[in-house]
Image (cartoon, helix red, strand yellow):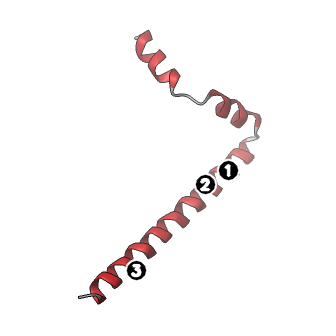
């Protein structure tokens, strides 16, 4: 079991966890919401790019 735990610990960003724990719960929530807004922006950009590529592909026929 310890080998499994050690394997997971190698991939942890301990500095990032420490920095996050320095923030208030409100600040952590604000960061999370900003990340969610960014992810949604990326989804919309990807959808636009796919739609544009499909339109160009369909128009090229």
Rendered residue at 63%/50% (across/down)? 32
Quadrant in which residue 16 is drawn? top right
User: Mark 3 or mark 2: which comes first in sequence?
Assistant: 2
Where residue 49 sits: x, y (%)? 43, 74
Quadrant in which residue 58 is drawn? bottom left
Front-most of residues 19 and 45: 45
Q: Which residue is mark 1?
A: 31
Q: Quadrant of the C terminus?
A: bottom left
Q: Label 3 crowding class (10 Å Cα cut-off): few <14, some 14-19, many 20+?
A: few
- Asked if 42 appears above or below 48 in the picture, the reply is above
Disc 3/disc 2 C-alpha distance (Å) = 26 Å
Q: Which residue is mark 2?
A: 35
Residue 30 relative to residue 48: left or right: right
Disc 1/disc 3 C-alpha distance (Å) = 31 Å
SS label for mark 3: helix
Residue 45 relative to residue 57: left or right: right
Contact (CB < 8 A) between labels 2 and 1?
A: yes
Front-most of residues 10 and 25: 10
Contact (CB < 8 A) between labels 1 and 3?
A: no
């Amino acid at each position: 079991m310890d080998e499994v735990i050690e394997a997971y610990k190698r991939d942890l960003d301990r500095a990032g966890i420490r920095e996050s724990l320095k923030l208030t719960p409100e600040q952590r929530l604000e960061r999370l919401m900003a990340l969610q807004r960014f992810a949604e922006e990326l989804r919309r950009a990807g959808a636009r790019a796919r739609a544009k590529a499909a339109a160009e592909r369909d128009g090229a026929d």
